[in-house]
Amino acid sequence: MNISTGHDIAHALALLLRRGTRTRLHTHLTEGLGEGVDELTYPLLSGLARTGPCSAADLGREIDLDRTTVTRRADRLERAGLLRREPDPADGRATLLALTGDGHDTVAVTRQRLAVAIETSLAAWPQADARTFARLLRRFADEGPFASGAPDRDGRP
């Protein structure tokens, strides 16, 4: 592989990871899901689905938002019945954010919508290419620079 391939992949990733791209995708995924669910609150739902119950600070680190922003958005999701606050069993003074049953259902709907959108976008591809793309993308996610344990920009794991 040459440096040009690395640049091509970096450019494609930059397009995918742009805030505007994520916002458009989150807007599409959350359309019509009710009060409290939108492109701003979706990352909390998705993050909690990945992590399970956690503090606002820990969720903020997971989804790259500050604790105050997470707390404000969590208030909206709590009012909508998608998130609840519960005592931290490890620290009685702390509170954890957790998805409710409706919150889990909402995440399931958005993940199904995402899967359909991906399938639709790959519909014109030969099936073998789509399967190869999925396999290699998974490998890149597991082994590439975004993998857990991969060095950060300062070279530290």
Image: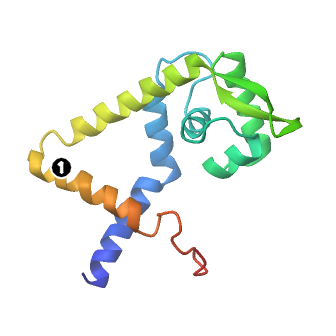
Q: Residue at x 72, y 39 (%)?
A: 70
Query: Pointer 1: what residue?
Result: 131
Which residue is more in the foreground, 20 or 37? Answer: 37
The furthest residue to the front: 90
Disc 1 residue crowd, few under 14, some 14–19, many 20+, Cα 10 Å:
few
Residue at point 72%, 17% (across, down): 79
Horizontal and vertical percent position of residue 37? 58, 24
When the figure is inspected, residue 154 is found, relative to residue 104, above or below; the finding is below
Q: Provide the secondary structure element on which disc 1 rests.
A: helix
Q: In which quarter of the image is residue 93?
A: top right
Q: Quadrant of residue 51?
A: top right
Q: Where is residue 95 in the image (x, y as percent from the top left)?
A: 81, 34
List x then y, in percent, for residue 87: 81, 29
Q: Quadrant of the C terminus?
A: bottom right
Say which residue appears at 57% left-offset and 81% top-offset.
155
> Does 107 sit above or below residue 56?
above
Q: Coloured how?
A: rainbow
Task: Please state which of residues 60 and 39 is positioned toward the viewer in this rendering.
Answer: 60
Q: Where is residue 58 in the image (x, y as percent from the top left)?
A: 71, 47
Residue 127 in the figure: left or right of residue 108: left
Asked which quadrant contains residue 142, the reply is bottom left
Name which residue type carries label 1. Arg
Q: Residue furthest bottom?
A: 2
